[in-house]
Amino acid sequence: MAWISFIIAIGGTILGIVLLDVSLSTKVFFAMGYIFSISSCFTLAKVIRDKHEADKLLAKIEKAKTEKLITKYGIEE
């Protein structure tokens, strides 16, 4: 569903830019801005995902260290 809406949004915007009644240089400017916006969205999503994955891994490592200490020293809650 997400890919379908993404494709429809891109297609609609490209069609809107093509049918826009302005000079070619203005259309190219709008298209360039649109492409950079899409690229920035993908980059931002990747950075957020990578940060989430790294935080998850660090939490898992911290939990393992804590469990090891509890087992080693016999600390009970």
Image (spheres, grey):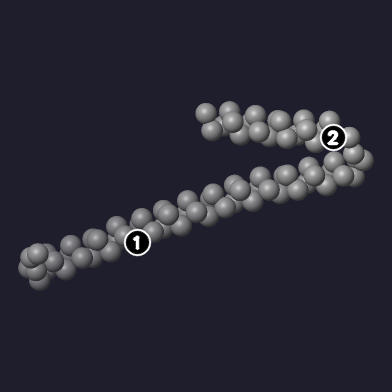
For the point 78% across and 42% down, the residue is 31
Local SS, label 1: helix
Q: Residues within 10 Å of mark 1 (few under 14, many from 20)?
A: few
Image quarter of residue 26: top right
For the point 64% across and 51% down, the residue is 40
**In this rendering, is residue 2 above or below 32?**
above
Callout 2, which amino acid? Leu
Percent of width and height locating residue 16 = 78, 33
The C terminus lies in quadrant: bottom left
For the point 61% across and 34% down, the residue is 6
The mark total stands at 2
**In this rendering, is residue 19 above or below 23?**
above
Q: Which residue is mark 1?
A: 58
Q: Specify whether 61 is left or right of 73.
A: right
Q: In the image, which disc is placed on residue 33? A: none
Q: Residues within 10 Å of mark 2 (few under 14, many from 20)?
A: few
Percent of width and height locating residue 56 = 36, 55
- In depth, the one of 66 and 16 nearer the eye is 16
Callout 1, which amino acid? Leu
Local SS, label 2: loop
Q: Which residue is mark 2?
A: 20
For the point 20% across and 65% down, the residue is 66
- In depth, the one of 23 and 73 nearer the eye is 23
Outermost residue on the front side: it is 21
